[in-house]
Image (cartoon, helix red, strand yellow):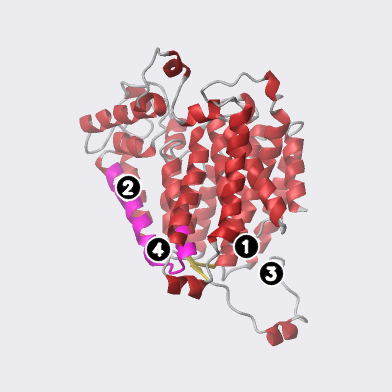
Amino acid sequence: MLIIIHILLGFSATLTPYAIIAWFYLVLITSAIQVLKEKDSIFVLVSLIFYLISFELISRMARTSPFIPYELGKYLLCAGLVFGLLRYKTIGIMGWIMLLSLIPGFFIDVSGQVQQSDIIFNILGPINVALAIAFFNRKRLTSIQLGKILRLMIYPILGVLAYTFVKTPDFDEVEFVLGANVDLSGGFGSNQVSTLFGLGTLFIFILMVNKWEFSGYFILDALVLFALAFQGLLTFSRGGMLGAVLGIVVILFFLRSAPLFKRKKYQLPKIGKYVLPGILVAVLAYVAVDQITNGLLSLRYQGETMGTIQGSKEKSLYTITTGRLDIFLGDLNLWFENFIFGVGAGASRFLRETMTGTVAHVEVSRLLAEHGLFGLIYFSVLCISGLVLLKYNENPMIKGILFALYLVAVYTSFHAAMRTFVTPALIGLSLLMIRAPKKVDPKKVKKKRKVPQLILE
């Protein structure tokens, strides 16, 4: 039923914004009451925040602003994390160090052109990452609860899938080129659409491999996986889909390298029975899109452009990264010239010699250019948090999933900076301590049936 509801919401978004607005506030208001009741568990709060921020892209597509803010993920995630920190009195040292390192950038503007909107646009993402590390670090949830959170984040992505399906023209009418295709992204930003579909592909794969189920039917889950991968590949924006591949490879690495005694102890899924079907579905999606585009998809992922094919350009890291390397090097030059304090939050695009005026796509270089040495401290702490998370979960599958989420989050910041909810949300999830659900005594369950149960239970 929830799958059908969110697909219908995606269809309705092509006609009117009001169905999305009504559903969003219905969930927000009714669930907020439940959050206020639940004082002992962070699960309800985290579930609500992560579900609602996943509406960011479909809300933009439906043009729900100002009822639902255009940058919903940034504002809602920030508010939710601050609420969680105050409610649960959390003290995450690494997160607070990262927050403090951002402060000098607020008071510096070497360009003299930065406006308040530029500061919010550039710095709220890193703030959310720091808040996520402060709040989530070593918080305890069960594997079942983790699966439910991933499932909740997929539902709104299905709305985006339905929207792009309606808005995508017939393939005969599309002129495929070696570049990101807005027409096949529902007329919206191909990088954002690809990132979201890549995220959905990774989440569905995780659910299928662990038998946590999404729809309850393996065939239907496989169809959803195929649809997300297929539509994501059609955008010709490589970042999001490569992120999904990165996450899957990391999970397979941890699963494959697990010692025999751990395989038996944690009953890890068999690669042939549970993993290969998911990989085959994704490969079929790639083959299908490559056939439809007459082999252009393969050329796109090989880094070819129309210029390199025609011989007017030489294939290099500059062409493969579609300008991101130019931005990265330009930001590094700014950092070398302003090593201690940087040029100030939001100022790099006005001062950069390469790709002047273009907003940063590589977050680490933006941090260095705009925050100087303090930006280096920020990114160093972020890297340390990723290494630390490997110590807290013994189950190889869980460890692989969490580390995959962390790496995908950092990787996303290299092609989409921290402008969306993806990086802070995934980094937050990656720092959880996941435990197996407690076994329930059937006799005790029978006795408790007389007691009214909470909605989420």
Of badges 1 and 3, the one in the foreground is 1
- Say above or below: 131 vs 359: below
Residue for badge 4: 91
Residue 245: % across, % down: 49, 45
Asked if marks 3 and 2 touch (Cβ < 8 Å), the reply is: no
Marked residue nearer the N-terminal end (4 or 1): 4
Of badges 4 and 1, the one in the foreground is 1
Residue for badge 1: 211
Mark 1 and mark 3: Cα distance apart in space = 20 Å
The type of residue carrying mark 2 is Tyr
Q: Is residue 389 magenta?
A: yes
Mark 3 and mark 4: Cα distance apart in space = 29 Å
Q: Is residue 421 magenta?
A: no
Q: Which residues are magenta?
A: 375-400
Badge 3 local density, few (<14 within 10 Å), some, or many (20+)? few
Marked residue nearer the N-terminal end (3 or 2): 2
Give residue 378's mark.
2
Judge from the rendering whether residue 202 lies leftward or rightward of residue 453; answer left or right: left
Residue 343: % across, % down: 29, 31
Q: Residue at x 47, y 55 (%)?
A: 252
The type of residue carrying mark 3 is Glu
**Which element is circle 3 on?**
loop
Q: Residue at x 46, y 46 (%)?
A: 246
